[in-house]
Image: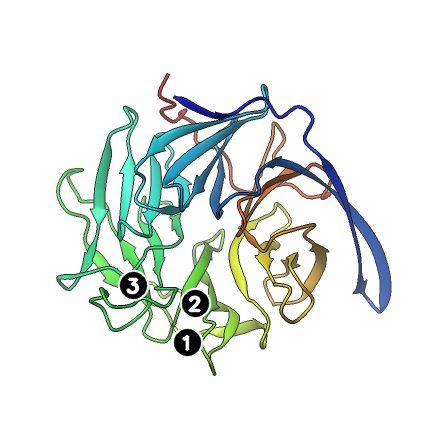
Amino acid sequence: MIGVSAALLAAPTYASETAFRIGGETVATSWDWELLAGPATITEGPVWDGAGLFYTSIEANEIRRFDPATGDVTTLYRDSGGSNGLAFGPDGALYACEGTGRAVVRYDANGTKTTLADRFAGRRLNSPNDLVLDSDGRIWFTDPRYGENHSDRELDHDSVYRITPPAQGVGPWPIERLTVDTTRPNGLLLSWDERTLYVAQSDYDMKSVRQLRAYPIAADGTLGAFTVLHDFGEARGIDGMCWDTEGAIVATCGWELSGPGSRIAVFATDGTVLEEQPVPAGRPTNCAFGGPNLDTLFVTTMDGRLYRIPNTGRRGQLQPPPARPFLHQ
């Protein structure tokens, strides 16, 4: 385990204030933003392991962990394939979307990496971005390609996929393409009853759309026609998102170029905006609840910051894995 920073016990705290309307009334709120690391290069994929926060540094090609007990940030995995989104399985296995590695991978209880999917129909994936596990252990993930260089892409679409564990526990994971109507799908969530898939359609090409979409999931696992819950217009749409215990979607979105700016937006599942909080600096990329009571929100940003907010008044719904992940100890 390689340390990348000393204890950050004197990290600066920023007060972030905003006002939003509920029931026709203007309500003022504030969150306290504590800067734990950065700025540097893009950070992503925060996920709570029960005692610390895993997250990715994409351009540094690392998976890191913040330890609240010491304030230390350590590098757990190098050469991580430009890992972006992360998720834990109940056995403590760590699943990652590798953007430059163009694969979905698993790190097991011994820290050994296995590639689960890197192709669809014989062609290499674009750049797996974010993922979520369902109760059957299947992995749902998005596969956009951002940036100017598309010279090495082999697929002519940016889709959402699902891979299924092999029946006997060994062998290839079958892959299914779920969407034919997405361009640059980004963050995604499954509803608690696993009957709806929420997808951030976040395409920044000219005449493209930025939307929060809800796809009904049929009994056979296919997706029905989507409903647009929120349209971001010309502003930056959602990057990453997570659930709170009230059934609200807590999402990272916005930029300084247009719209309300970089912020955390909280949506009801019908698309109603319940709350918005501006980010002190940097475009937010993802968020996750953690801490002993899952009432602390961690936020990553495009410019490599890691924030901690202890007073959102919300708690996370996603529980940490029952088994501890491998920590290279």
Question: How many residues crowd around disc 2 within 10 Å: few (fewer than 14), some, or many (20 or more)?
Answer: some
Kindly identify which residue carries mark 3. Answer: 220
Find disc 2 in the rendering and name its residue: 216
Please state, as top left, top right, bottom left or bottom right, where the C terminus lies in the image: top left
C-alpha span from label 3 to label 1? 15 Å
Nearer the camera: disc 3 or disc 1 = 1
Residue 327: horizontal and vertical position, in percent?
Answer: 39, 23
Q: CA distance from mark 3 to mark 2?
A: 11 Å
Q: Which of the colour schemes (rainbow, by chain, secondary structure, one colour) is used?
A: rainbow
Residue at numbered disc 1 = 225
Q: Marks 1/2: CA distance?
A: 7 Å
Q: Picture coordinates of residue 10 (x, y %)?
A: 69, 26
Question: Badges 1 and 2: C-beta atoms under 8 Å apart?
Answer: yes
293 displayed left or right of 227: right
- Marks counted in the figure total 3
* Residue under the image location 36 percent in, 66 percent down: 218
| Secondary element type, mark 2 | strand
What amino acid type should be assigned to the residue bearing mark 3? Asp
| Residue 214 as seen in the image, left or right of residue 130 | right
**Sequence-first disc among 3 and 1:** 3
Numbered circle sitting on residue 272: none
Q: In the figure, 11 relative to 25: above or below?
A: above
Question: Which amino acid, by three-letter code, is at mark 2?
Answer: Pro
Name the residue nearer the viewer: 268 or 187: 187
Residue 112: where, in percent of width, then height? Answer: 24, 29
154 sits to left or right of 187: left
Residue 123 visible in the displayed image? yes
